[in-house]
Image: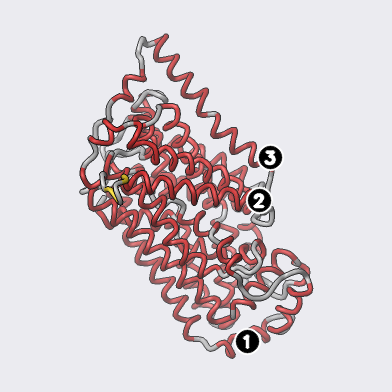
């Protein structure tokens, strides 16, 4: 993978069109006073000085596939590194499953509605329809990754420019359309008038305008989408010139995706008005019986409002937005398979899983990851999307906070190991290691994100069962680690702790 491929991996893991659809559709009903475009722009710099910076430094220091598993199993303790990476891998497969399952409801359904195929749109939005479609894509993505990282990178390079072009076309239409034209055309297709949307929302608990508190609370959305922007670190062993590619891939990728999110999302506010869109989304989520349109307030809906007779335009842009979910999904499978490969290399899983084909692809870990993703998808299809993703986010942020704290103390408690790092990873600021400062800011941001989500039930709905499930997934790493240790020690006569005293080969 080149530096561009690393950047592309980062952006595709957070595909802006997909994130804009989710945040702009559900966010206004979850946070009053939110200005999502400002939250996403501010989120660039919050993540930049925390997780992105931290993971770039670690990637340069120890450029191995498996990322934080390899780092912290050597720098802290094998069980800690495995637990962190185990849960993050579950998160990646969780996202993979959700992206598979939403292929139908979020992306294909609007296209079929536009074409007049309402029954087909309803079917792809149903449980069985969404699962069948997701399964077909799961098979296709698995076969793609089995062709190797080179083939994947080439195809995803083309997808980057295609999806970007789709966003530019969509945003240009909205930016160039006067609001008066939008209001006229909305009134022509809606069961109520433009101004009545805001009045109905106000009467049902919505608050007009945006506030600083709303913008800050809205950071939970870019924190969820950008995460720690360190995804190239998980495939570092397959990236060329890591000391350069880490900065371009992680920091550059964060800035690209952040500006893409902000400008694309703001185009909706520009054409319709902040208050109108937030009110419309609020009604859709909170007062659905008063929602005035036949289709949800997805970004694609705004093209339908503006040009209901230009079916070809809606289908074209709708298809490009559909490709944004295709662009987003396989990277999760790619990263999970590399993490699983690293575990197997250290004998925490059967070493047979380290088998690679002639293309260099880890065959078994790709297939096992795909099977797990398939099972999770069936569960996700039966759950509330916002509750599932938000409750996973809470635990994910706590784990990331622990990663930040471990990085904060690392240079001081493992001084000998830190001194072995390359100079590019041993930067000092004011006499303090930059990796420590980045770890501290990562911990602060991550714990704040977890607290804000857990303390505000409106942010997707707090689910005790979902939280317990996610915590159980995290803790399940302990018996897996202990079982692997005992099996290797008692059956094979191997002490696997010795493996963690050295860095695995690149």
Q: Decide if residue 432 is on the left or right side of residue 327.
A: left
Q: CB of mark 1 within 8 Å of CB of mark 2?
A: no
**Quadrant including the C terminus:** top left
Q: Position of residue 452 (x, y in %)?
A: 60, 53
Asked whether the viewer can see residue 183, the reply is: yes
Please identify, in this view, whether the residue under mark 1 or under mark 2 is nearer the observer: 2
Q: Is residue 200 above or below residue 73?
A: below
Label 3, label 2: how far apart the Cα atoms are: 16 Å
Q: Earlier in the sequence, mark 1 or mark 3?
A: 1
Return the residue at label 2.
Answer: 455
Label 1, label 3: how far apart the Cα atoms are: 43 Å
Q: Is residue 51 above or below residue 177?
A: above
Q: Which mark is residue 183?
A: 1
In depth, the one of 261 and 190 nearer the eye is: 261
In depth, the one of 62 and 379 nearer the eye is: 62
Asked whether the viewer can see residue 140, the reply is: no
In depth, the one of 67 and 153 nearer the eye is: 67
Return the residue at label 3.
Answer: 465
Q: Residue at 46% across / 69% down in the picture?
A: 262
Label 1, label 2: how far apart the Cα atoms are: 37 Å
Q: Position of residue 134 (x, y in %)?
A: 53, 50
Q: Residue at 40% across / 27% down in the picture?
A: 78
């Amino acid at each position: 993978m080149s530096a561009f491929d690393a950047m592309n991996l980062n952006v595709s893991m957070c595909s802006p069109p997909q994130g804009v659809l989710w945040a702009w559709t559900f966010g206004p009903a979850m946070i009053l006073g939110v200005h999502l475009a400002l939250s996403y722009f501010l989120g660039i710099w919050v993540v930049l000085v925390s997780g992105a910076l931290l993971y770039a430094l670690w990637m340069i220091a120890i450029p191995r596939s498996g990322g934080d598993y390899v780092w912290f199993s050597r720098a802290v303790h094998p069980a800690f590194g495995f637990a962190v990476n185990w849960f993050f891998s579950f998160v990646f497969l969780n996202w993979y499953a959700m992206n598979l399952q939403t292929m139908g409801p979020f992306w294909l359904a609007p296209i079929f509605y536009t074409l007049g195929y309402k029954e087909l749109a309803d079917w792809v939005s149903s449980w069985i329809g969404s699962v069948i479609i997701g399964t077909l894509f799961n098979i296709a993505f698995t076969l793609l990754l089995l062709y190797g990282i080179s083939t994947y990178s080439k195809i995803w390079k083309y997808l980057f420019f295609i999806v970007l072009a789709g966003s530019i076309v969509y945003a240009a239409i909205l930016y160039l359309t006067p609001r008066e034209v939008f209001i006229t055309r909305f009134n022509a297709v809606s069961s109520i008038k433009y101004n009545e949307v805001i009045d109905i929302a106000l009467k049902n608990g919505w608050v007009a305008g945006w506030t600083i508190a709303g913008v800050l609370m809205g950071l939970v959305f870019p924190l969820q989408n950008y995460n720690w922007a360190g995804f190239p670190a998980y495939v570092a062993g397959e990236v060329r010139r890591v000391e350069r590619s880490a900065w371009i891939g992680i920091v550059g990728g964060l800035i690209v995706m952040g500006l893409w999110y902000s400008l694309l999302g703001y185009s909706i506010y520009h054409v319709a008005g902040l208050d109108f869109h937030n009110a419309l989304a609020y009604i859709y989520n909170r007062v659905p019986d008063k929602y005035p349109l036949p289709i949800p307030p997805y970004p694609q809906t705004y093209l339908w409002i503006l040009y209901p007779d230009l079916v070809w335009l809606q289908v074209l842009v709708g298809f490009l937005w559909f490709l944004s979910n295709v662009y987003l999904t396989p990277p999760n499978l790619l990263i999970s398979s590399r993490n699983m490969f690293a575990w197997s290399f250290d004998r925490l899983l059967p070493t047979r899983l380290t088998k690679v084909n002639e293309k260099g692809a880890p065959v078994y870990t790709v297939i096992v990851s795909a099977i797990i993703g398939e099972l999770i998808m069936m569960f996700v299809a039966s759950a509330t999307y916002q509750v599932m993703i938000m409750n996973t986010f809470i635990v994910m942020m706590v784990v990331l906070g622990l990663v930040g704290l471990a990085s904060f103390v690392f240079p001081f408690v493992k001084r000998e190991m830190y001194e072995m790092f390359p100079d590019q990873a041993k930067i000092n600021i004011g006499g303090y290691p930059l990796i420590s400062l980045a770890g501290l800011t990562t911990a602060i941001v991550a714990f704040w994100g977890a607290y804000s989500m857990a303390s505000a039930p409106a942010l997707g709905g707090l689910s005790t069962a979902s939280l317990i499930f996610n915590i159980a997934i995290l803790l399940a790493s302990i018996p897996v680690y202990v079982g692997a240790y005992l099996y290797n020690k008692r059956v094979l006569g191997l002490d696997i702790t010795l493996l963690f005293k050295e860095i695995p080969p690149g």
